[in-house]
Amino acid sequence: MRFFKEITIVATLFFSFLLSTFGQNSTSSDSLFKLILNSDTRTLYKLSGSWETSIDGGEPKSEYFPKVFYNCETVKIRKIIHLDKQLIANSVWHLYFLGVNDEVELYWNNQFLGKFVSDGSPLWVTLPRKATIKEHNEVEIVMSSSNSLAYKTRRNYPFYRKIVTGIPRDFYLVRTPTAWINYIAVNPEFESLGKGNLRLKVNISSFEVENLLRVQNPTQIFPRRNFSLEMILRDRVTKQVVGRSEIGSFELASFRNIVLEASIGILNPNLWEPENPNLYEVEVRLSALGTLVDNLVQEVGFTKWDNYKLKEGFGFILNGKPFLLKAIDIVEDYEYYYSGETIKKIEGDLRNLKSMGANAVRFLFTPPHPLFLALANRYGILVLIDLPVYNIPSNLLKKSDLFIRFLTVMENIAKNCGTNPSLFAFGLGEGLNFAQPETQDYIQRISSRISHYLRIKKFVTFVIGQEPKQLNLIDFYVVKDNFRIKENEIVLSELRKMNSILQNPVIFNFGVIIDPTNHKGYNDPMSVEYQAFFLNNRYNIRNQVGNAGVLFWCYNDYFTENPQIMTSKNEPFVCYSGIVNYKSQRTAFNMLKALFNNEETPIVNPGQPESDYPVLYILSGVLAFLLWGVMINRSRRFREHTFRSLFRTYNFFADIRDRRLISNWQTGIFGLVISIIIATYLSSVVYYYKTSNLFNLLMNFFIPNVFFREWLFRLSWQPEIFVTVFSLLIFVKLLLIAILLKFASFFVRSKIFLSDTFKMVIWAGAPILFMLPIAIFLNRILPISPLLGYLFNAIFILLILLWLLRLIKSVWVVFDVRPSVVYLISSILVIISFLAYFSILEYKYYIVEYLSHYSQIGVL
């Protein structure tokens, strides 16, 4: 205890330093945050740090936030926040999240503040008047992944990014005066290129306004305050004032929300465009009786967009000059951006994009980090933001909870990021059935709400092969490549058709998934070189048509919610569609750079075409044939059983009923032969379709279990393991069916043994022998024509059905019951199983609506 006093002093100083750091250093002097929220009157408390965390109701532990968690439903975090006692009475407090995944519930000192939707968009929550603000406040945040219709629509899109739970970006506690500027909406207008006008809508909110000047005038009470609003426009670099406007005085009562409109005129404005991103700062100052109450500074730019007629279709005009959109998709990667040095990584990507020659990016699935938008203003990169509306059937799109969610995301972006000149367009939906009135109603309603907040372009995405339709309130269209259409002539024809029907600019969107470890040349469609070859090929198609621009999918690889069969050789839950990864640039990066900058394209190695036919299928087929052939040649009884089970079915099953000698071990070997044939055929089919997006889509619907689908996809790339594992699984499944039949025999008078039901199940499958040559050579045959795939799969299904019918026949023969009873019970069981399976898929995933929708838009 000798040093207790010294330890106490050191500990006190240490915690005082922590509190000082929390309360002072994390204020508006933070230069990073000034890019997002620039104000001299607000105090910011950064909430990043250690929080007491409970995952799915587990034991609490300390975790550092921002952080996201995978494969969990609910994350609850709790922390005590210390506030300056002197600031509590005359302040309003807000929680500001730069982006939360999905939904969040907020509690302040055990008071429920509400449940809010973010979906990655910035979220500003004002603590209500009823909230108790103290010196020490307990904040609890409950984050959850939505299990509602919103989740189902994401899960049904095969390439949707990984759905996580948590807070991936920084979040803050913001102190404002009791009257504050809520948000600013700007709309640059032009009388001509030499004369501009900046229209502003300023949203102002208030709590107890009589407290505003109580410190300066403690004896005077101000029930209503005479306020004034001043707007100043400055050059961002020189800080020179180039225009101002003022609303002299207005009345603002307590607990009100008002919107004021004003405009600032400017002569010869410096225009913002990707080559010359000239920026201005608009400062809005709210004063009360000559005293500054609140101010907000935001960057703005002047741009003038028009369309003009091309030879085929329409193009963009930006600030009086033709503009070709050279865009690339980006999917925000949590692990990369938010593992530290966020601003450095964002700037690195922006520099990459500029060096490549890109002038625009589209953010898929979630909105960009507000820092990205702020820096894109300065680098000269246009930003398109997709609302998370992907391939949703029309009858689901009309549901109110989905529309409200999409509307909330849009409003969050508009209020918190709407002044950025780099914010170019909102994507209202991809792969929708635009001919349906429900879809058109959705487009009309969401477009109207966007126009209420922003003067921003709006677009939708068609799929090649889908019937185009001119839509009101839509400024341009994106036409997405269809993975089912490989022929360049068809793609060219469809693009020309789109250009002729759609009376607005059309952007061509294309991309491909690859294997990042495959360097066999572009003759291999999964190779790194093929990505560059494909990109060059599709870009040349765009040049022939003369679209208004291109949009490449995509800049970076990303984690997906669903496993991808194409990438399962490496990692099933990663979509390898990017031209960069964490460490390096792929060949396609240099190809795209050359195309964007009109440079000579790099030479891409074609490689040598290689056979993609595993020898294993011959070996497994030979093994099955040898097992069966040896038994045929060495055992007369086995030969008789084989032919009698095929052609004299009733007599054969009657022998089983009458206990005539049929060897159990011969039956077991025959069951193993059948299992190997089926496993070889299934492996051959899956191996052939392992690079098929259509097969990936269908498996996404018909195998809803993610873990089984991942396991199947991994095995598809390892045929030797696939055949071995599935041979054993099929044999075990046959044994289980025999056990079920043994239990069913308790309801009949005949005494049936397990060996009898086992023989019934195995020998009923004798027609599967006819699949042996097909299973061996299927991978050689399928490339000849897609129709052969349909034919052989139909034959396989018919043989399985024949097996089932023969098994039913064996039941009424061996069990010695009336055939009509067995057929009736079997039909009922099959129908119930079928209906139960599809009812579950329909209830959980809307499979009927989605299959119908995909067929309508030309994907199936």
Image (tube, helix red, strand yellow):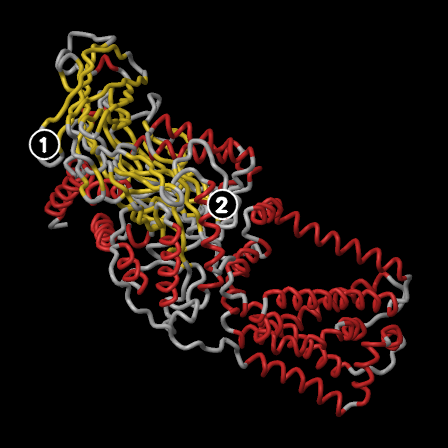
Instruction: Judge left or right: residue 38 versus residue 589.
Output: left
Q: Please name the residue shown 40% across and 49% down the image.
A: 508
SS of the residue under disc 1: loop
The residue at which mark 2 appears reads as 431
Q: Which mark, residue 122?
A: none
Q: Please name the residue shown 63% across and 48% down the image.
A: 840
The number of numbered badges drawn on the structure is: 2
Instruction: Judge left or right: residue 808 versus residue 205.
Output: right
Q: Is residue 845 above or below residue 195?
A: below
Q: Is residue 726 above or below residue 538?
A: below
Q: Please name the residue shown 84% across and 76% down the image.
A: 647
Work out whether residue 559 or residue 463 is closer to the camera in this orientation and state it. 463
- How far apart, in angstroms, are the residues tagged by discs 2 and 1? 46 Å
Q: Position of residue 611 (x, y in %)?
A: 49, 78
Q: Amino acid at mark 2?
A: Gly
Which badge, 2 or 1, is on the more N-terminal residue? 1
Instruction: Judge left or right: residue 20 versus residue 725.
Output: left
The residue at which mark 1 appears reads as 239
Q: Position of residue 399 (x, y in %)?
A: 54, 34
Which quadrant of the figure has residue 134?
Answer: top left
Work out whether residue 823 or residue 159 is closer to the camera in this orientation and state it. 159
